Amino acid sequence: MNTDECWVDVAAVARHLGVRRESVYRWIEAKGLPAHKVGRLFRLKLSGIDTWVRNGRASEDGSKK
């Protein structure tokens, strides 16, 4: 991961993936989407999200494709 990369919020991740914010929250809780809690808010790095998706972690049944 790029250390100069900015942390983004859930809304930015939802826009990046083309999904609803609720999906992002669900993936954080149930599927291990890489996120860090800062106070009450989640912060994420898009490079980590892209890797997570490429590794098949976003699939509904959890199987790698």
Image (tube, helix red, strand yellow):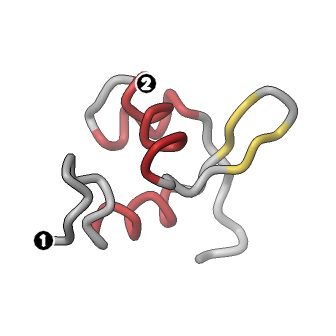
Left or right: 24 in relation to 41: left
Query: Label 1 amino acid?
Result: Lys
Q: Which of the two discs, 1 and 2, labels the residue nearer the N terminus?
A: 2
Task: Find the residue positioned furthest to the right.
Answer: 39
Q: Residue at x 62, y 75 (%)?
A: 2
Q: Residues within 10 Å of mark 1 (few under 14, many from 20)?
A: few
Q: Foreground: 30 or 21?
A: 30
Q: CA distance from mark 1 to mark 2?
A: 24 Å
Q: Is 20 drawn above or below residue 24 in the view shown? A: above
Left or right: 45 in relation to 18: right
Left or right: 60 in relation to 37: left
Q: Residues within 10 Å of mark 2 (few under 14, many from 20)?
A: some
- Which structural element holds mark 2? helix
Q: Position of residue 16 (x, y in %)?
A: 36, 42
Q: Which residue is mark 1?
A: 65
Which numbered mark, 1 or 2, is in the foreground of this view?
Answer: 1
The number of numbered badges drawn on the structure is 2
Q: Position of residue 51 (x, y in %)?
A: 40, 70
Q: Which residue is mark 2?
A: 21
- Which structural element holds mark 1? loop
